[in-house]
Amino acid sequence: MRVVLAEDSLLLREGLVRLLDEAGATVVEAVGDGEQLVRAVVEHRPDVAVTDVRMPPSFSNEGLRAAIEARRRVPGTAVLVLSQYVEESYASDLLSETAGGVGYLLKDRISKLEDLSDALRRVTEGGTVLDPEVVAGLFARRRRDPLDELTPREREVLGLMAEGRTNSAISKRLVITAGAVEKHISSIFSKLNFPPSDDDHRRVLAVVTWLKS
């Protein structure tokens, strides 16, 4: 798996290069700002662009915007955005402007090689990865709460769906059968007026669209 990395801090950038290498990825170029990220993606056409949200010069959302621009120029490039803090609006921006192969994780999460490897694999396969804390924040921001119609178990299933988990992963996490997971998902879509789908990415986007409404 070929990666272009963007991180403005030299120390963190070198640490991420080593971490990505341990996760089985090859960093073809590591850069320090959004403009260089776009250039590197166009030049190397990597499998995935990994970038911090906040980059020079204003340290707001330059990394996110650069990743979206890079993906526009090289369609199909997966994007994994990293952040020090939970910033739900940035996650919403990323998901609304791209279609599949995107992820948003807190930096603390990627210190676990298993989580990083799993996230890289899922975004390069066209899936969507959301940090559990981002999902929780999106739930908390809602002014009205259609979740009242869901059972506690359906809420658990919906939260795991929003993280990008497959039916099999949900089954293992909640220690329930695959058939029970399918029934819960069918009930969730029915209560929230979303048609069921076998497409895992479309399921996640439906959940995120609902969370943002």
Image (cartoon, helix red, strand yellow):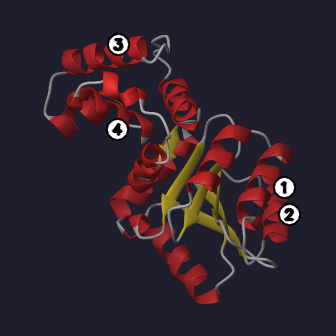
SS category of the residue bearing label 4: helix
SS category of the residue bearing label 2: helix
Tell me the CA gap for discs 4 and 2: 35 Å
Residue 39, label in figure: 2
> Where does the image place residue 103, in percent across and percent down from the top left?
55, 49
As drawn, 103 above or below 59: above
Tell me the CA gap for discs 1 and 2: 5 Å
Judged by depth in the image, the label closer to the viewer, 3 or 2, is: 3
User: Which amino acid, by three-letter code, is at mark 2?
Assistant: Arg
Q: Pointer 1 and pointer 2: residues touching (CB < 8 Å)?
A: yes
Tell me the quadrant of the picture where the C terminus can be found. Answer: top right
Q: Residue at x 86, y 63 (%)?
A: 39
> Where does the image place residue 55, in percent across and percent down from the top left?
73, 74
Say which residue label 1 marks: 42
Q: Is residue 129 left or right of residue 101?
A: left
Tell me the CA gap for discs 3 and 1: 41 Å
Tell me the CA gap for discs 1 and 4: 34 Å
Say which residue label 4 marks: 160
Crowd rating for badge 2 (residues with CA inside 10 Å; few <14, some 14–19, many 20+): some
SS category of the residue bearing label 1: helix
As drawn, 133 above or below 100: below
Q: Is residue 7 left or right of residue 165?
A: right
SS category of the residue bearing label 3: helix
User: Which amino acid, by three-letter code, is at mark 4?
Assistant: Leu
Residue 199, label in figure: none
User: Which amino acid, by three-letter code, is at mark 1?
Assistant: Val
Say which residue label 3 marks: 186
Crowd rating for badge 4 (residues with CA inside 10 Å; few <14, some 14–19, many 20+): many
